[in-house]
Amino acid sequence: MTKQALIDHIRAKKSYLCVGLDTDPSKLPECMLAEEDPVFAFNKAIIDATLPYCVSYKINTAFYEAQGLRGWASMEKTVNYIPETHFRIADAKRGDIGNTSTQYAIAFLQHLPFDAITIAPYMGEDSVKPFLQFEGKWAIVLGLTSNPGAADFELKDLKEDGRLYEKVIQTVAGWGSTDNLMFVVGATRSDEFLNLRKISPDHFFLVPGVGAQGGSLAEISQKAMNKDVGLLVNVSRDIIFASSGNDFATVAGEKAKAYAAEMSIYV
């Protein structure tokens, strides 16, 4: 998906909601367990219910890979079910030496119809560049995360280069463009969003952590939105597991609708 197509979709819907399909088999409603593929059946129902209110879906691959071949099959069916109108993210956090990254890129961006994949940039340029070689595809690079361990490296002060996360974003931005690079920024880092927009004014940010993790949609929108909106705000558990009953899809749709309604205020 091109940047302009994504922007147009956001503008048309007045929503920048990304629904996270972090589908934990142990949390599936009982009514799904008799299905041949409970994970895919659940995802399909969630997608059908939320499609009108979001512009993107993020599949956290760990929840599928943990189930072996069966989980991979569920993931493949899920991403193929999501229509091309919606931005499809593989939250896989890959990143390795160049030839290995090339194989990861082929797996997720060529073999599977994902539009983007999340990348850990610790190993440098040659570990990221292979993901930038596919037209209309994106690398979403970890910038500043919400976890406590971010203090171990990301927030370290490098003196003349600023904090490490700032150095990472500034450096990685030169490896691609605003047409094929985004950055992950945790929603609970709202105090850093104004600074982030100074060093990266035109890139899209993928922002997880709203909902169950406590990030404020209003604060994110006010501090991090740019002229193109420039945000994909991900909500996972607060939507997909809002109900554990037979009404799980209906409740998920209502939750997504409420998030989209709030977003329409800010767009």
Image (spheres, helix red, strand yellow):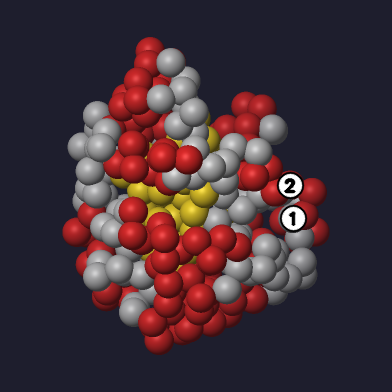
Residue receiving disc 2: 25
Q: Position of residue 265 (x, y in %)?
A: 40, 86
Residue most extreme to the front: 160
Q: Is residue 231 visible?
A: yes
Among the 4 quarters of the image, the one containing residue 251 = bottom right
Residue most extreme to the top: 99
Under mark 1, the amino acid is Leu
Horizontal relation, residue 205 to residue 3: left or right: right
Among the 4 quarters of the image, the one containing residue 31 = bottom right
Residue receiving disc 1: 28
Q: Which mark is residue 1?
A: none
Residue plotted at (62% across, 44% down): 150
Residue plotted at (77% across, 66% down): 244
Foreground pick, 23 / 17 = 17
Residue plotted at (46% across, 84% down): 261
> Helix or strand or loop: what does disc 2 sit on?
helix
Q: Is residue 105 above or below residue 53?
A: above
Q: Position of residue 54 (x, y in %)?
A: 43, 68
Horizontal relation, residue 210 to residue 213: left or right: left
Q: Is residue 198 above or below residue 182?
A: below
Quarter of the figure that contains the C terminus: bottom left
Rate crowding at label 1 as few (under 14), some (14 to 19) or many (20 or more) other CA atoms within 10 Å: some
Q: Are marks 1 and 2 in contact (CB under 8 Å)?
A: yes
> Helix or strand or loop: what does disc 1 sit on?
loop
Residue plotted at (34% across, 43% down): 170
Work out how far the residue at label 1 is from the one at label 2, CA to CA, in angstroms: 5 Å
Under mark 2, the amino acid is Pro
